[in-house]
Amino acid sequence: MMEPRLSLVGAGPGDPELITLKAIKTLQQADVILYDALANEELLSYAKPGAITRFVGKRYGCHALSQQEINHVIIEMALAHGHVVRLKGGDPFVFGRAQEEIAAAREAGIPVQVVPGISSAVAVPAGQMIPLTCRGINESFWVTTGTTQSGEISADIKLAAQSSATVIILMAMSKLEAIMEIFAGHGKGDTPVAIIQEGTTSREKMVMGTVRDIVFRAQYAGLGNPAVIIVGEVVKLHPTMLPGLESQVADAYASRQQ
């Protein structure tokens, strides 16, 4: 018998190999796969014969479907075909609007499961050997969106700019200049910044600089969405920066103790 159900599955940061075994097994069981713009289409090769695959993605300035329309498609497909996998880039619960889809499915009486994914916020810096935390340099990291639902810059950016934490900003390239002005206004003009576009994929591009000059560097390199912005002293630990990583960490730790 057909059993309507919804699985929200994290597709990982872009590299099709950076997906969990549980996610692959769930894709193989799906009757319908509704996938996002940031989900690598190579993952559709795990679909079983006869499974329906449909793009329902959104990118900045180009929405194939509204969120309400996506919710409707999820319910319609589950009731008509059974097991629907909603394949989302990164992790479903990191700026993935997963809760809205879960609420819509539950309201329609459709059971839901979540298969976590590897978030680009963590994996993309790691792929470039940029640690989010390093003893002696920082003790925490923030992950924030660049813009809110209203299109304004998140107020959390101002709070993050006042901390010593590494700040990872997603969905923010359209607001890059204004965001860097906020960091500069809090005395962070010389703080290192890395921007990584389409991280972990064969199309990956990266630019490094400081809060003061990263906007110009990014424009010159032609960087755009999707990209991860990393602001913090840990960017100096990238292998192409100053030589002697061990001595850098030791010096940074010693300066913090003084």
Image: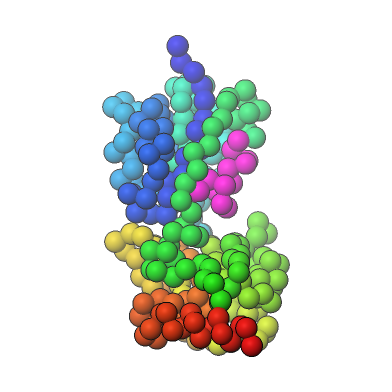
Residue drawn at (46%, 22%) of the image: 82
Q: Is residue 220 left or right of residue 210?
A: left
Question: Which residue is rendered at x = 30% and y = 45% of the image?
Answer: 42
- How is the model colour-coded? rainbow
Q: Quadrant of the C terminus?
A: bottom right
Image position of 110 with respect to 182: above or below:
above
Q: Position of residue 243 (x, y in %)?
A: 37, 85
Q: Position of residue 223 (x, y in %)?
A: 41, 72
Relative to 54, 76 lies left or right: right
Quarter holding the N terminus is: top left
**Which stretch appears magenta?**
88-102
Q: Is residue 89 magenta?
A: yes
* Position above or below: 41 against 14: above
Where is residue 193? Give x, y as percent.
Answer: 50, 78
| x 63%, y 28%: residue | 106
Residue 198 % position (x, y): 39, 62
Q: What type of secondary structure mainly makes up the magenta span?
A: loop
Picture layout, residue 51 above or below residue 239: above
Q: Tell me where residue 24 sits by quadrant.
A: top left
167 versus 191 height, above or below: above
Magenta-span inclusion, residue 62 = no
Q: Residue at x 50, y 33 (%)?
A: 7
